[in-house]
Image (tube, rainbow, N blue to C red):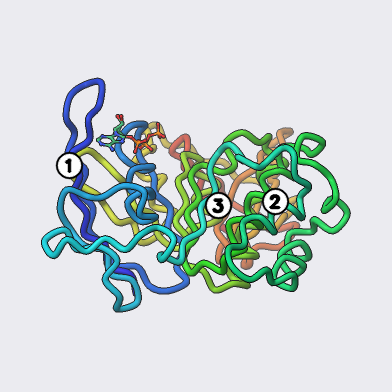
């Protein structure tokens, strides 16, 4: 279990902003930090990684105190079992993929760890290539593998997918979920992308100036985007496409094909040919089987 209680005064262009964060995270949870630009998402990750010290508060990780401002406890970054992936891949251009991973291993080099990571992130065919000859998605896979070289318990992902196109993004999301589960990580992701948040997260931390709301069900992140003007149509399910934890449901409404996102539970109850009602408040479509 991880307990965070963090206070930090942020110096922003618009003046001082108080960042206040309280919460308890279970081991192996996937948490997304969501909120407006400048609210302090990156700053929060940096405080967890030990790259920034809070003004007040504590970080307790599996009963070990990493930070206690009152007691002047501040575990150095290299002693925190944390892996970090940023938006820019920050790979060494003069080293091959394999050398980039090996370089990140401090102390005794364990080739098996590198080989396992290359395998799990499907980098076998690319291991002798230099980063500049790889696509953005491939480079980000290397950055992900590199973040795991030191066998972290916590993975911090600061908008790692925002430079990638939609298709590549979906592929990388699956790699992240794969390593999250396989290495039993507790993961913090910064993301602005609502479908991504719903697909990836167990819980969402919505950071707002002066407070943080913990959203238990990532589907609820839609509620603040609802606008009035509800509509309802009936139609027939033509296709059900599982995408991680959600389903993309193609529905024929009149002569139009409409794609609607359903959560895993809703998706599992639907079959091709089912008559359904699609109701929506604009950004929050709801799909219901008509019996
Ligand atoms: N060490 C620091 N001390 C005080 N303020 C800081 C410090 N580092 C960054 N800030 C300020 O805190 C604010 C929040 O920055 P941060 O990068 O955490 O926001 P963010 O929520 O990640 O934004 P974005 O979504 O745009 O990346 C910025 O205005 C930044 O200038």
In this rendering, which labeled residue sits more in front, label 3 or label 2? Answer: 2
Mark 3 or mark 2, earlier in chain:
2
Q: Position of residue 272 (x, y in %)?
A: 75, 58
Q: CA distance from mark 3 to mark 2?
A: 46 Å
In the displayed structure image, the side of residue 100 where residue 123 appears, left or right: right
The residue pinned by badge 1 equals: 210
Q: Residue 123 versus residue 250: which sits nearer the camera?
A: 123
Secondary structure beneath label 2: helix
Q: Quadrant of the C terminus?
A: bottom right
In the displayed structure image, the side of residue 218 where residue 269 appears, left or right: right
In this rendering, which labeled residue sits more in front, label 3 or label 1? Answer: 1
Secondary structure beneath label 1: loop
Secondary structure beneath label 3: strand
The residue pinned by badge 2 equals: 100
Q: Is mark 2 within 8 Å of ligand 1?
A: no
Mark 3 or mark 1, earlier in chain:
1
In this rendering, the answer to whether 222 lies above or below 182 is above
Q: Residue at x 35, y 61 (%)?
A: 216
As drawn, the label of residue 233 is none
Mark 1 or mark 2, earlier in chain:
2
Q: Position of residue 268 (x, y in %)?
A: 63, 67
Q: Residue at x 78, y 65 (%)?
A: 119
Q: Residue at x 69, y 56 (%)?
A: 101
Q: Residue 198 versus residue 176: which sits nearer the camera?
A: 176
Q: Residues within 10 Å of mark 2 (few under 14, many from 20)?
A: many
């Amino acid at each position: 279990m991880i307990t965070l209680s963090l206070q930090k005064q942020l110096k922003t262009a618009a003046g001082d902003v108080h960042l206040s964060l309280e919460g308890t995270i279970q081991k192996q949870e996937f948490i997304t930090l969501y909120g407006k630009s400048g609210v302090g998402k990156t700053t929060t990750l940096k405080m967890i990684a030990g790259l920034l010290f809070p003004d007040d508060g504590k970080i307790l990780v599996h009963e070990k105190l990493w930070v206690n401002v009152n007691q002047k406890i501040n575990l150095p970054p290299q002693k925190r079992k944390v892996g970090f992936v940023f938006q820019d891949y920050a790979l060494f251009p003069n080293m091959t993929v394999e050398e980039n991973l090996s370089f990140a291993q401090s102390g005794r080099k364990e080739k098996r760890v590198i080989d396992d990571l290359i395998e799990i992130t499907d980098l076998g065919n690319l291991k002798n290539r230099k980063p500049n000859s790889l696509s953005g998605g491939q480079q980000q896979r290397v950055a992900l593998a590199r973040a795991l070289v030191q066998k972290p318990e916590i993975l911090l992902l600061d908008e790692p997918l925002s430079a990638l196109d939609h298709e590549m993004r979906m592929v990388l999301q699956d790699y992240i979920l794969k390593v999250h589960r396989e290495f039993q990580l507790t993961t913090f992701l910064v993301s602005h992308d609502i479908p991504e948040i719903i697909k990836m997260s167990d819980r969402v931390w919505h950071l707002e100036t002066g407070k943080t709301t913990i959203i238990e069900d990532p589907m609820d992140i839609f509620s603040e985007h609802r606008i009035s003007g509800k509509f309802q149509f009936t139609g027939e399910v033509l296709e059900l496409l599982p995408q991680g934890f959600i389903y993309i449901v193609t529905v024929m409404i009149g002569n139009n094909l409409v794609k609607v996102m359903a959560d895993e539970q809703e998706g599992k109850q639907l079959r091709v040919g089912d008559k359904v009602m699609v109701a929506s408040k604009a950004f929050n479509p709801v799909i219901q089987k008509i019996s």
